[in-house]
Image (cartoon, rainbow, N blue to C red):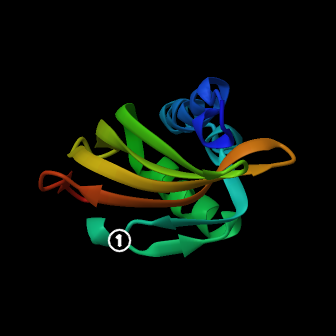
C-alpha cells in the first residue's frame, strides 16, 4: 500500500462540522444568542451581501446582526441539508449546505429564504468552527419588513 492510497477516515470531522449548523439553527430558533454564536470562530465572517444585507466580520459584528434578528422576529425555523464538505488539510475544510428559513416578524410579516451557505471551517482548540459563511439566495427571498 502506498501513502497515496491511504485514506483518512473523516467521518467524525464531517459530523462535527454538520453539527455546527444544527447548533447554530437551534440557537437562532430558540433566541439563544450564546448558542447561535458558539459555532463561529472569533474572527469569523458572515457575508449576507448576496441577500441584500451586509458582510459582518468578527463575532462582535455578527452578534450585533443577530441581535437585530432577535429584536424583530416573533418566530422562526431554520432547516439545513445537502451538506458537501471537503477537506483542505487536517484543520481546514470548505463546503456548502442548503438552508430553508421560515418565520414571522413581530408585525406578522413572513420572512422566508431558500438559500445556499458557502462555508469555510477551521479546527480550533475548541473544535471545528465556522470561519466564513456566505449566504446566497437560491430563490428570491421574502424579507418583508426585516
Task: In this rendered view, identify the residue nearer to me: 25 or 6.
Answer: 6
Quarter of the image where one finds residue 13: top right
Task: In this rendered view, identify the residue nearer to me: 8 or 106.
Answer: 8
Q: In this view, does 124 lie above or below 53?
A: above
Quarter of the image where one finds residue 63: bottom right
Q: Name the residue under label 1.
A: 53
Whole-percent x, y for residue 50 in the image: 29, 69
Residue 146 in view here: no
Task: In this rendered view, identify the residue nearer to me: 114 or 8.
Answer: 8
Circle 1 Cα neighbour tier, 10 Å, few/some/many (<14 / 14–19 / ≥20):
few
Say left or right for 107 vs 30.
Answer: left
Whole-percent x, y for residue 16 in the image: 64, 31
Q: Is mark 1 on a helix, strand or loop?
A: loop
Whole-percent x, y for residue 3 in the image: 68, 41
In the image, what residue occupies the spot 40% across and 40% down?
84
Which residue ends up furthest to the left in the rendered image?
140
Amino acid at each position: 500500500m502506498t501513502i497515496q492510497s491511504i485514506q483518512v477516515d473523516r467521518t467524525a470531522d464531517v459530523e462535527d462540522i454538520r453539527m455546527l449548523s444544527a447548533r447554530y439553527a437551534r440557537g437562532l430558533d430558540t433566541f439563544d444568542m450564546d448558542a447561535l454564536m458558539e459555532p463561529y470562530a472569533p474572527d469569523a465572517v458572515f457575508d449576507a451581501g448576496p441577500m441584500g444585507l451586509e458582510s459582518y466580520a468578527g463575532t462582535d459584528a455578527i452578534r450585533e446582526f443577530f441581535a437585530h434578528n432577535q429584536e424583530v422576529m416573533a418566530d422562526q425555523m431554520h432547516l439545513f441539508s445537502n451538506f458537501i464538505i471537503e477537506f483542505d488539510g487536517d484543520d481546514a475544510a470548505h463546503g456548502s449546505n442548503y438552508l430553508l428559513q421560515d418565520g414571522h416578524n413581530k408585525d406578522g410579516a413572513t420572512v422566508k429564504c431558500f438559500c445556499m451557505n458557502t462555508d469555510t471551517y477551521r479546527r480550533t482548540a475548541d473544535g471545528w468552527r465556522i470561519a466564513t459563511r456566505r449566504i446566497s439566495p437560491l430563490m428570491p427571498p421574502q424579507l418583508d419588513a426585516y
